[in-house]
């Protein structure tokens, strides 16, 4: 059943595969291009004008920028984001591009498309090249500080290259003045290099690990051991040199010993690609599974483990690892948690939330894990930190088995949509534990003969007769009067009075004869139910506030037989809780009555398959108006 909810708004996909038209004119790239070709003019983008407003949203520019068009530019067919080709320049140089090659405009235009997607160039500030790369490839970035790199780092990089991952490396700078400074070895600090190959050579019977690095400037190379014309190559036979593609060209690409690489570089970034972003003939691929979800205030925005009371309400995702890596005892996987759309919201004051995740061993029983589980069990693994980045990713190796991964924001009650991706060496199975709905309805009790009634029931019968009048049936108004008369005496429940609406709902639930009124038998069955629900209310109102918080409600509903999906819980909180996320007894009762009515109707209609019913529009609307 389609229903509207904020977490279900259409999610932007990685750009290349989302061909939505996003230009305000409503025209697609093809239409805009056709228009320009017919009129013989160059395209000017009114949505993203060549003005300071597109460069900045909060700062005034320090220098006057001039927007120029590259003269040799050809329209690229594959861009889904339509931009014109004006680029911000200062003193005839591109402002937002770190390429010395004046002819290479495609990356600048890519950057412009990215800036348009995000509102302005300034919104990109603090976003790294790898983040843009992730957006354009749909991949997942991993960051390795080389000093802390794992023992099998060479093998990790080797596998990454085989999988077609994009690899970048760089040397840290201590301050801004060091940026782009050249070291005595010909390396540039704070500059983004790419890793293009790994190989080993035999030298006097010894195997030496080499790495090939490229400076995207197309010049300025490493001049230490194994560089283009270094003496080390003389001890390598020409065939080996050919195999490694060794040439002494000043093309920006060079080999160096892996050990030297680890000494001279500080950071390696790997952008792991999903199989669909790779060429078909790529032999090695990650297996990827994706989960979309949301943290919603009051239902699934539980915060990190520091907040035990709410942590358990976060979405929980079960991860089953069955096959170990080739020749290994463990199963390797990357878990990448991404918050969505925050960068676009930046100009409206939305910052990145601090996010992360924890991984627990899955207990034998199925279903959403409760607060007590987390009180007594420590996590097996975690994201390295909780951090305010768009994406947090980590690499793990765990023995085969079942695990529960819990994505969360650091603080509770913070709202965002997220996307969790698991990249695994071998196939892994993931399942969202919060999609399970399990409803356990009690049998409706048989009626007791009048002569076996308890004293309480006899008193009720008398009261009922007084209010119902001669027909011995109560209308919604009469029921409202009756229930309030009885419940006023229950001082442990804090509420003003039961609403007429609740009483109408109760009649919908209990009126088996279908005349819109309750006869005594129907009322008596309801009274037993009400007593049970009152007990649950008192039991699960843990802080004795007299109201049910949205978190207390979740456990109370479960005890009442309703294990609901994350989406349903979010809807219930939106509908029944007040701004402080509290439900008074009337809201609580209403919620339970409607849940039980809906469940019983479903049960009676789903005779063939207990998970589905078929309704036409008339039946559907009749039902929803009646529930
Ligand atoms: Ca070279
Ligand atoms: Ca009736
Ligand atoms: Ca409470």
Image (spheres, rainbow, N blue to C red):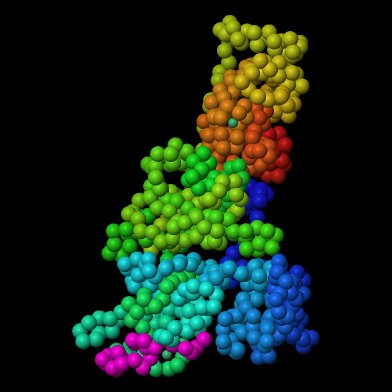
Pinpoint residue 149: horizontal percent, then vertical percent: 37, 67
**Residue at left offset 60%, top offset 82%:** 106
Is 461 or 424 nearer to us in this picture?
Answer: 424
Residue 100 visible: yes
Pinpoint residue 38: horizontal percent, then vertical percent: 77, 85
Residue furthest toward the left?
205
| Rendered-image quarter of ligand 3 | top right
**Residue at left offset 62%, top offset 27%:** 546
Q: Indicate left or right for 625 with 391 as reference.
A: right
Is 151 or 330 nearer to us in this picture?
Answer: 151
Q: Is residue 583 magenta?
A: no
* Placement of the C terminus among the 4 image quadrants: top right
Q: How many marks?
A: 0
Residue 40's place in the image compared with 490, above or below, is: below
**Residues rendered magenta in the picture:** 217-239
Question: Which of the 4 image quarters holds residue 86?
Answer: bottom right
Residue 593 visible: no
**Residue at left offset 62%, top offset 63%:** 343
Residue 554's place in the image compared with 264, above or below, is: above
Question: Which of the 4 image quarters holds residue 417?
Answer: bottom right
Q: Main secondary structure of the magenta part?
A: loop
Q: Indicate left or right for 474 with 171 as reference.
A: right
Pinpoint residue 103: horizontal percent, then vertical percent: 60, 89
Residue 73's place in the image compared with 173, above or below, is: below
**Residue at left offset 66%, top offset 62%:** 346
């Amino acid at each position: 059943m389609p229903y509207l909810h904020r977490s279900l708004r259409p999610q932007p996909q990685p750009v290349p595969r989302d061909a939505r038209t996003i230009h305000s004119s409503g025209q697609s790239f093809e239409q805009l291009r056709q228009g320009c070709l017919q009129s013989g003019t160059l395209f000017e983008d009114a949505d993203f004008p060549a003005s300071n407003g597109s460069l900045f949203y909060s700062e005034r520019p320090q220098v006057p920028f001039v927007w120029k068009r590259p003269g040799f530019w050809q329209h690229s067919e594959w861009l889904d984001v339509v931009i014109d080709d004006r680029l911000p320049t200062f003193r005839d140089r591109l402002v937002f591009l770190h390429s010395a090659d004046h002819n290479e405009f495609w990356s600048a235009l890519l950057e412009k498309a990215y800036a348009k997607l995000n509102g302005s160039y300034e919104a990109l500030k603090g976003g790294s090249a790898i983040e843009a790369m992730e957006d354009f490839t749909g991949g997942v970035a991993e960051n390795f500080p080389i000093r802390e790199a794992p023992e099998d780092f060479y093998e990790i990089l080797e596998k990454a290259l085989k999988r077609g991952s994009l690899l970048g490396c760089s040397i840290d700078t201590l301050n801004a003045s060091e940026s782009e400074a050249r070291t005595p070895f010909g390396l540039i600090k704070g500059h983004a290099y790419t890793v293009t190959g790994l190989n080993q050579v035999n030298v006097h019977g010894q195997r030496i690990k080499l790495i090939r690095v490229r400076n995207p400037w197309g010049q300025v190379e490493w001049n230490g051991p194994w560089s283009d014309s270094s003496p080390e190559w003389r001890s390598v036979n020409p065939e080996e040199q050919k195999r490694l593609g060794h040439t002494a060209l000043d093309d920006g690409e060079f080999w160096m010993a892996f050990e030297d690489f680890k000494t001279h570089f500080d950071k390696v970034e790997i952008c792991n690609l999903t199989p669909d972003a790779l060429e078909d003939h790529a032999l090695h691929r990650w297996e990827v599974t994706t989960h979309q979800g949301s943290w919603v205030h009051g239902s699934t925005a539980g915060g990190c483990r520091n907040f035990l009371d709410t942590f358990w309400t976060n979405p929980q995702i079960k991860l089953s690892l069955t096959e170990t890596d080739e020749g290994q005892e463990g199963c390797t996987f990357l878990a990448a948690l991404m918050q969505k759309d925050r960068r676009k919201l930046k100009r409206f004051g939305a910052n990145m939330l601090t996010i992360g995740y924890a991984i627990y061993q899955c207990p034998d029983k199925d279903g959403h894990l409760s607060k007590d589980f987390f009180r007594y069990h420590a996590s097996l693994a975690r994201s390295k930190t909780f951090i305010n980045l768009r994406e947090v990713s980590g690499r793990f190796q765990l023995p085969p088995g079942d695990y529960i991964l819990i994505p969360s924001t650091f603080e509770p009650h913070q709202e965002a949509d997220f996307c969790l991706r698991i990249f695994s060496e071998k196939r892994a199975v993931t399942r969202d534990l919060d999609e399970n709905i399990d409803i356990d309805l009690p049998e409706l009790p048989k009626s007791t003969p009048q002569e076996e009634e308890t004293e309480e029931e006899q008193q009720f019968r008398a009261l009922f007769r007084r209010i119902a009048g001669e027909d011995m049936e109560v209308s919604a108004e009469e029921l409202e009067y009756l229930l309030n008369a009885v419940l006023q005496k229950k001082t442990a429940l804090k509420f003003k009075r039961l609403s007429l609406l609740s009483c109408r709902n109760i009649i919908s639930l209990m009126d088996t004869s279908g005349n819109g009124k309750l006869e005594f038998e129907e009322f008596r069955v309801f009274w037993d139910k009400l007593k049970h629900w009152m007990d649950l209310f008192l039991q699960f109102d843990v802080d004795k506030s007299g109201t049910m918080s949205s978190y207390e409600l979740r456990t109370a509903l479960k005890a009442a037989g309703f294990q609901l999906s994350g989406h349903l819980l979010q809807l219930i909180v939106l509908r029944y809780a007040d701004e402080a996320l509290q439900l008074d007894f009337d809201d609580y009762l209403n919620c339970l009555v409607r849940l039980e009515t809906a469940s019983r109707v479903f049960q009676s209609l789903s005779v063939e398959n207990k998970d589905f019913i078929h309704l036409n529009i008339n039946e559907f609307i009749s039902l929803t108006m009646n529930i």
